Image (cartoon, rainbow, N blue to C red):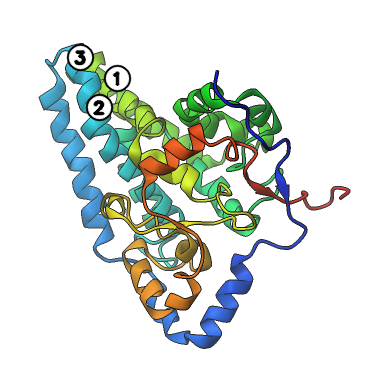
Amino acid sequence: MGQHVSRTDFEWSYTEEPHASRRKIILEKYPQIKKLFGHDPRFKWVAGSMVLMQFAMLFVMKDQSWKMIFLVAYFFGGVINHSLELACHEIAHNLAFGHARPMANRLFGFFCNLPIGLPMSVSFKKYHLEHHRYQGDEVIDTDLPTLLEAKLFCNTLGKFIWVCLQPLFYIFRPLIVNPKPPQKLEIVNAIIQLIFNTIVVYFFGWKVMIYLVVGSLLAMGLHPVAGHFISEHYMFAKGFETYSYYGPLNWITFNVGYHNEHHDFPAVPGRYLPEVKRIAPEFYDTIPQHTSWTRVLYDFITDPAIGPYARIKRKAKGLDS
């Protein structure tokens, strides 16, 4: 079973989330960062090319063996789909076409969602923006593991299983912790996705549909690119609740590893986040950071000091402290 985690509760904070105050301080010193706000004109071409690449893979995977379906899904298709999930993250912040064109962002989100197989673009936006504004809130921030998760997956084997099941927790946790009625665009997202999935099954067969969906799920679990889920906010150093990673996997994840920079300036597109770090290095070079997402997964599973409890939480607004 492995070692039991040493923590028996989350790390509770009674201050506001740190990024709004950091943003103010950094902008007072470096107001030129505001010039990076807006959208990335290259983004739509990069993300669109990934979608087209997966469309081409429908023809490639049509007659492959089941073994090849799963291998390619893990090592290639899942990586592309994970990148598209992070494209939907950029789109949630209106960084594809800018804040002045919200519907263009939503429509492009539907397009980027197609190879993922599961409708998530609009639902992700609904919860993710609250994660930024209310980071650590025990109810509103559904990025936080629940108390049940922390109690159940409390040793080495349990944490290994939890990492493998991460996609299920990300899908169902918001529905349990902070359920919200579906929005009209969520329904549209689901209908478009269902039509696309039906077309894929009709013309290419169930194997190809499984290639898309399984790739999405595998690359959200025990997979190097999924290391960012844990690296971003799990407390590897006491008192620090957001961590950046500056390694090569940023090249295929729209620089999501620049996570302190992203939370400080969510209006800056991923392509420009390295420029934020270059402008204000003293705010980022001096705080803990990760050098490997694979190492993050290994440490999370094997280190008894780290686990689902290793998150900074805040009491929900309106609840007794």
Q: Which residue is mark 1?
A: 210
Badge 2 vs badge 3, beta-carbon distance below 8 Å: no
Residue name at image x 13 percent, y 16 percent: 64
Q: Which residue is mark 3?
A: 67
Check the image and report above or below for 218 versus 47. above
Residue name at image x 52 percent, y 82 percent: 27
Q: Which residue is mark 2?
A: 73
As shown in the figure, which amino acid type bears the numbered disc 2?
Ala
Q: Position of residue 33 (x, y in %)?
A: 43, 80
Q: Nearer the viewer, residue 244 or 288?
A: 288
Check the image and report above or below for 66 versus 277. above
Distance of mark 1 from mark 3, alpha carbons? 12 Å
Distance of mark 2 from mark 3, alpha carbons? 10 Å
Q: Residues within 10 Å of mark 1 (few under 14, many from 20)?
A: some
Quick one: SS at disc 1?
A: helix
Q: Residues within 10 Å of mark 2 (few under 14, many from 20)?
A: many
